[in-house]
Amino acid sequence: GQCVAVCPVGALYETDNTFKLVEDLMNPKKKVIVQVAPAVRVAIGELFGVAPGIDMTKKLTTALKRLGFDGVFDTNFAADVTIMEEATELKERILSSLKGEKDVKLPLFTSCCPAWVRFVELNYPEFRDNLSTTKSPQQIFGALAKEFWAKEKEIDKKDLVCVSIMPCTAKKYEASREEFVRDGVADVDYSITTRELGRLLKQYNINLLEMPEGEFDLPLGESTGAADIFGRTGGVLEAAARTLYEWISNGKLENLDFVPLRGFEEVRTAEIEVEGINLRVAVVHGLGAARKLLEEIKNGRGHFDAIEVMACKGGCVGGGGQPYHHGDFEIVKKRAEGLQVIDYHKELRESHENPCVIDLYETYLGEANGELAHKLLHTHYIDRKNK
Ligand code: SF4
């Protein structure tokens, strides 16, 4: 790939993989598939003159097919799987703690954001075991593509190239972590940003606005509204709360909107009562605010069962790979609202109701957090300070 300096002193490099992608798309020996993160669909339109927050999903799927991908899939599918695993993990930790078991690591921290994960590994090793071991949606998608989808299609996973379109520059680093390589094959081969995809489409004279509407391919393209909100601050925890609530109560949740978890305050906290259990949860965006909260917890001043942390203000909609917003946070808010609208309009809004996810567990994975799920969908964390 080619390197583009993004740091004024040239100390940091952001790898641009679009050249590699073009090469792979032209290689007849390779099958190239793509996944698109939720935050991308409400921002890429800006590069073509559309207002922030407008959902470009349907035109985007067609544009990606025109680029020549062999499968156009949705990171959302993997986000629903993430909730199956992470909500199971949270439920198990909470029940163990209620039974009085010692050494249960609570609060559980979300682990979808690689910048946050790395921050904990480098600065707070004492909280490393609080990170959910569930992989991020990007990595879960890659693992399922290489193991499940490739097998179904009778493709040698070594000939399958899994590309992701991400709002994020840290996702490039995440894809390259050695924990995410199995049998010499990486879950995700490389990731490109929203901005890079916009540039590539323009180079190929693909005008997003003129594309007819299309759909994601199945089954890895099916998703619920819970997955869409992964792209905004508070969304992962809200998605987990919807599922966890129903699993613990064995009932149907009447109101799926956990309003106290929404909004853009740096730290939001809420109590969720289910079957006599009081869950204390918090949502944080920005690593400065996360550091403050971790210090409070260390000093015994904050007690939580689950905390969502996203490094970027606003969550992934405000990610470093998105169209530049030049400091105008209203743009980020509009994208977040756009994702909320998508969630409201989805027929299904809870991850555990995704029919293709249910089918995946029934026919392939077995139980959430079971043996195969653990092998493919979970990871571990290391002390990067002393590495
Ligand atoms: Fe990437 Fe920012 Fe999202 Fe973290 S919050 S995954 S750094 S875009």
Image (cartoon, rainbow, N blue to C red):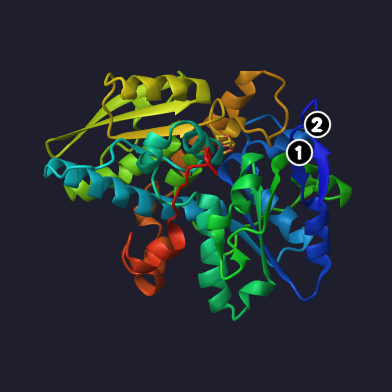
Q: Quadrant of ligand 1?
A: top right
Res 145 seen here: yes
Gap between marks 1 and 2, in whole Å?
7 Å
Judging by the rendered image, the residue that carries numbered circle 2 is 10
On the image, the x and y values in percent for residue 87 come to 32, 48
Residue type, numbered disc 1 = Tyr
Residue located at (15% from left, 45% from top): 101
Q: Does the residue labelled 2 lie within 8 Å of ligand 1?
A: no
Which class describes the residues within 10 Å of circle 2: few (<14), some (14-19), or many (20+)? few
Front one among 264 and 189: 189
- In the rendered structure, find residue 359 and report the number of the disc placed on it: none
Q: Return the residue nearer the eye: 385 or 41.
A: 385
Residue drawn at 57 percent across, 68 percent down: 146
Left or right: 162, with 355 as reference point: right
The residue singled out by tag 1 in the image is 13
Q: What residue type is labelled 2?
A: Gly
On screen, 21 above or below 230?
Answer: below
Picture layout, residue 113 above or below residue 145: above
